[in-house]
Image (cartoon, rainbow, N blue to C red):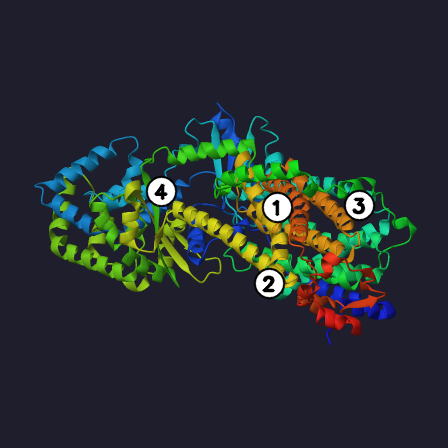
């Protein structure tokens, strides 16, 4: 025999210790689970990207300097003063950076380090020469008297005042054999259009000096990055007190992420504080009972604890942003205790009130949970977590409402409510206003037309918060980065991957084999020279063979001629010893691995090598510039091991659109079919579902008219609208049925609780309209539009359709014998013949209804007295 909810109520009423003990035990279990849950603040978890796109996004973030901070020191017109201030700042950092947060701080270019890189390349020049270099060298050697003319040129260069800068290169390359290699090395350095002043980095107008820092925490760990920024601000204030004319601004990915987090927290505190005050005022207006108000918060709090404990079972960590968005879900959860407490004000018998309201509560809960579970299959990690978290939150809340809350609600005198205004609103029946119905139909048609023009905004920068100074500085740097780039070219990132960098190098060499061919026909305009300097062992062996072959052919001629011509030109016998040593010794490949090339991998090509977050996959990346019109052709030739940023954006836009369509379809089907299954009549399912469909048309149309776009954040409210809307429409449909079948005025009670719930949601999320963060403000915009549409349709359509169907068809729409009677223990109906009157539930059955009872009894289990069996066939 199935246990009824009233049986559980009776058991807990007589066993108070078991009731209290079970509540305490469950709470302790959830709290203990909560301590094992870790939280993250990575907003990229919301990106609806598949495995391939997420890998590409990770690669791009690592090589594009997303973790870099740029410290801008401004003092227009006095570069020396600015340099002194920077030196003071760096000195303070070195003395006080006990946590080693700023080890990568770059204040000035280390020319010695640059010289060391050049020396390393010269000393290992056979490993960096490619086939074209040998073709060039052979053509030079074929020129008559080339060695003599080359040495004469070297002699003239050494007479210039700057000869000390080139003397090292002449000793390694007196015959200008290797200059293409050094040109490729120079072109691999980042060209930002900066100026050097005493080796300090300045902008071209010399108004700002730039100090660069790699955040050790990446760009997504906002809590740790905020500590880093606080340390930098403190260093600025402490060290530059002697330089009051110098100001410092900080830009970069980590700074923007911290600014977003800080802005969200400030906006949340302001909005939540404001909304809590208004919600408490609303609740006090509705319930003159502090205990019942506290019970509402306790119920939702217990549901939140239930959800966090449940998340600890299914997930190791959860996005803190998901928990923040829970304020939206709390607006749905608060409906459950609100409806119960509101109904008990009309029906003081707790047991009967629970029995009356359990059906719409559970049906609404199941449909809402089903709608949120539709998020779980999505690609976005955060949206999956949100779907699971919201489902657990609503399940936990309904469990508390059904099992525990009825025993603690205050019923006596001080539970009377100030209901004059609420009753006045609840008594308004829009289904009886023909002018309102006509206006609604006309507006719906207009908004339906506009709804097809609602847009998605996949540009993440539009939901990022930046101060005016950050925006100005970012635009300034973007101009510096792109001023020399052709607007007709796009950057394509070619990459190879493997378990180690050696494997990645081998793989990328196979990938880029077509690149040289594409370059020769002009499809690729420019490419990073990383693969000229970092190659696989197989390629190193081939290059070593080329060098050995070259020296065997030319060693005697070059060394003899160089020695003779150098003496004639006045050079000492040891002037070119480095060069002759290179000609004598062939590279030994046994000691060469990626660590050997550290002078390059830690400087010039640092951004070309990256590891996955888990450290299991190594990547080598080679950016190439491609004519915009030929990008697709190049990608087709290279294959899957290349991507462009626009491609990631397109994938995200497509996924957003697919997710949105999926959410809408999945939520619609889940809600509609469960309503049909629950009510047992498709007419009742349509009555409950149609308001949500029409309200969705209103939402899309109003957004299009007001220029509001969906984005990765407010798209979550698509599920929320269904969750909130089906609760309201289910209550309205249930109320219409209840009043029709039992002739008891319960619809007014349901309307009051809907008004209270909607008011709380308007206040709770609508206060975010004052937020400065664009993502949070977009939540408020969609919420205000959505709640207005949902409440209006819930108030109008179910009573209108129910009235039309019952009066026109003369068919009683009573509860069927379906999941309702199975879950909630609906008692068998008893019809009796008393003194010639047919009595149902203590009331006489009207003749109009009596004529249709045979139809009704196919759906309703009844018990008939002997005198009525033959008449009704039961």
In the image, taking residue 796 as reference, residue 652 lies left or right, namely left
User: Image height check: is 384 above or below 693?
Assistant: below
In the image, residue 214 lies at what x, y percent? 49, 46
- Between the C-alphas of marks 4 and 2, the distance is 42 Å
Mark 1 residue element: helix
Mark 2 residue element: loop
- Between the C-alphas of marks 1 and 3, the distance is 40 Å
Which mark sits nearer the N-terminus, 3 or 4? 4
Any part of residue 9 in sight: no
- Which callout, 2 or 3, points to the residue nearer the camera? 3
In the image, residue 583 lies at what x, y percent? 20, 53
Which residue is outermost to the right? 413
- Which callout, 1 or 3, points to the residue nearer the camera? 3
- Which callout, 4 or 2, points to the residue nearer the camera? 2
In the image, taking residue 190 as reference, residue 291 lies left or right, namely right
- The residue positioned 69% from the left and 40% from the top of the image is 271
Which residue is the site of mark 1?
227
User: In this orientation, which residue lies closer to the viewer: 511 or 150?
Assistant: 511
* Mark seen at residue 283: 3
Mark 3 residue element: helix
- The residue positioned 65% from the left and 52% from the top of the image is 805
Which residue is the site of mark 4?
189
Mark 4 residue element: loop
* Mark seen at residue 316: 2
Which mark sits nearer the N-terminus, 2 or 3? 3
């Amino acid at each position: 025999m199935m246990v009824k909810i009233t049986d559980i109520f009776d058991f807990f009423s007589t066993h108070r210790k078991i009731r209290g003990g079970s509540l305490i035990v469950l709470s302790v279990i959830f709290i203990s689970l909560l301590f094992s849950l870790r939280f993250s603040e990575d907003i990229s978890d919301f990106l609806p990207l598949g495995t391939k796109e997420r890998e590409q996004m990770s690669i791009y973030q690592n090589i594009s300097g997303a973790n870099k901070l740029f410290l801008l020191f401004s003092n227009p017109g006095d570069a020396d003063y600015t340099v002194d201030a920077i030196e003071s700042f760096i000195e303070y950092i070195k003395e006080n950076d006990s946590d080693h947060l700023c080890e990568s701080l770059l204040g000035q270019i280390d020319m010695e380090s640059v010289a060391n890189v050049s020396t390393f390349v010269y000393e290992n020049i056979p490993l960096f020469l490619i086939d074209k270099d040998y073709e060039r060298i052979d053509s030079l050697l074929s020129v008559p008297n080339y060695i003599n003319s080359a040495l004469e040129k070297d002699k003239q260069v050494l007479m210039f005042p700057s000869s000390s800068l080139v003397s090292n290169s002449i000793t390694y390359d007196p015959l200008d054999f290797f200059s293409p290699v050094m040109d490729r090395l120079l072109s691999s350095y980042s060209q930002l259009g900066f100026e050097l002043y005493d080796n300090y980095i300045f902008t071209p107008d010399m108004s700002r000096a730039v100090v660069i820092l790699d955040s050790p925490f990446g760009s997504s760990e906002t809590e740790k990055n905020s500590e880093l920024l606080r340390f930098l601000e403190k260093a600025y204030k402490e060290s530059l007190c002697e330089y009051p004319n110098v100001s410092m601004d900080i830009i970069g990915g980590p700074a923007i992420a911290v600014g977003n987090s800080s802005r969200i927290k400030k906006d949340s505190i302001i909005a939540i504080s404001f909304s809590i005050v208004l919600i408490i005022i609303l609740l006090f207006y509705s319930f003159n009972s502090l205990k019942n108000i506290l019970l509402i918060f306790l119920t939702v709090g217990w549901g939140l604890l239930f959800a966090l404990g449940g998340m600890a079972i299914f997930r190791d960590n959860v996005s803190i942003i998901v928990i923040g968005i829970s304020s939206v879900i709390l607006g749905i959860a608060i409906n459950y205790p609100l409806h119960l407490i509101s109904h008990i004000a009309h029906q003081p018998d707790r047991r009967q009130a629970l029995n009356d309201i359990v059906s719409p509560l559970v049906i609404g809960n199941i449909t809402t949970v089903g709608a949120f579970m539709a998020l779980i299959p999505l690609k976005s990690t955060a949206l999956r977590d949100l779907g699971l978290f919201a489902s657990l939150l609503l399940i936990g809340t309904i469990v508390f409402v059904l099992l525990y809350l009825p025993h603690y609600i205050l019923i006596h005198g001080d539970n009377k409510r100030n209901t004059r205004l609420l009753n006045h609103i609840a008594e308004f029946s829009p289904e009886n206003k023909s002018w309102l119905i006509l206006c609604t139909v006309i507006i719906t048609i207009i908004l339906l037309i506009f709804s097809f023009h609602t847009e998605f905004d996949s540009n993440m920068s539009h939901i990022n918060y930046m101060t005016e100074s950050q925006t100005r500085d970012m635009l300034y740097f973007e101009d510096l980065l792109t001023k020399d780039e052709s607007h007709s070219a796009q950057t394509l990132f070619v990459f190879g991957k493997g378990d180690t960098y050696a494997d990645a190098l081998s793989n990328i060499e196979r990938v880029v084999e077509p690149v040289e061919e594409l370059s020769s026909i002009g499809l690729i305009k420019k490419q990073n020279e990383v693969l000229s300097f970092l190659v696989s062992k197989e390629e190193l062996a081939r290059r070593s063979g080329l060098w050995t072959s070259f020296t065997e052919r030319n060693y005697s001629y070059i060394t003899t001629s160089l020695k003779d011509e150098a003496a004639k030109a006045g050079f000492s016998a040891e002037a070119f010893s480095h060069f002759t040593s290179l000609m004598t010794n062939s590279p030994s490949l046994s000691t060469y691995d990626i660590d050997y090339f550290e002078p390059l991998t830690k400087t010039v090509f640092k951004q070309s090598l990256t590891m996955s977050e888990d450290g299991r996959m190594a990547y080598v990346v080679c950016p190439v510039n491609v004519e915009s019109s030929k990008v697709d052709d190049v990608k087709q030739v290279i294959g899957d091991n290349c991507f462009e940023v626009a491609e990631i954006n397109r994938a995200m836009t497509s996924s957003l659109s697919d997710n949105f369509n999926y959410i809408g379809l999945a939520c619609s089907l889940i809600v509609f079919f469960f309503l049909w299954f629950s009510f047992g009549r498709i007419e009742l399912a349509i009555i409950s579902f149609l308001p949500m469909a029409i309200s969705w048309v209103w939402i899309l149309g109003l957004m299009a008219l007001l220029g509001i776009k969906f984005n990765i954040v407010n798209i979550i409210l698509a599920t929320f609208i269904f969750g909130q809307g089906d609760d309201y429409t289910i209550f309205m449909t249930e109320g219409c049925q209840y009043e029709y079948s039992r002739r008891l005025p319960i619809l007014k009670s349901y309307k009051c609780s809907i008004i209270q719930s909607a008011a709380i949601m308007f206040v709770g999320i609508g206060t975010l309209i004052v937020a400065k963060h664009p993502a949070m403000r977009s939540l408020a915009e969609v919420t205000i539009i959505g709640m207005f549409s949902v409440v209006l349709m819930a108030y109008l359509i179910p009573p209108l359709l129910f009235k039309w169907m019952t009066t026109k068809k003369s068919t009683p729409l009573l509860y069927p014998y379906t999941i309702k009677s199975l879950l909630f223990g609906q008692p068998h109906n008893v019809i009796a013949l008393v003194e010639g009157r047919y009595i149902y539930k203590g009331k006489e059955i009207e003749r109009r209804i009596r004529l249709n009872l045979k139809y009704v009894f196919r759906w309703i289990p009844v018990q008939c007295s002997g005198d009525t069996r033959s008449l009704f066939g039961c």
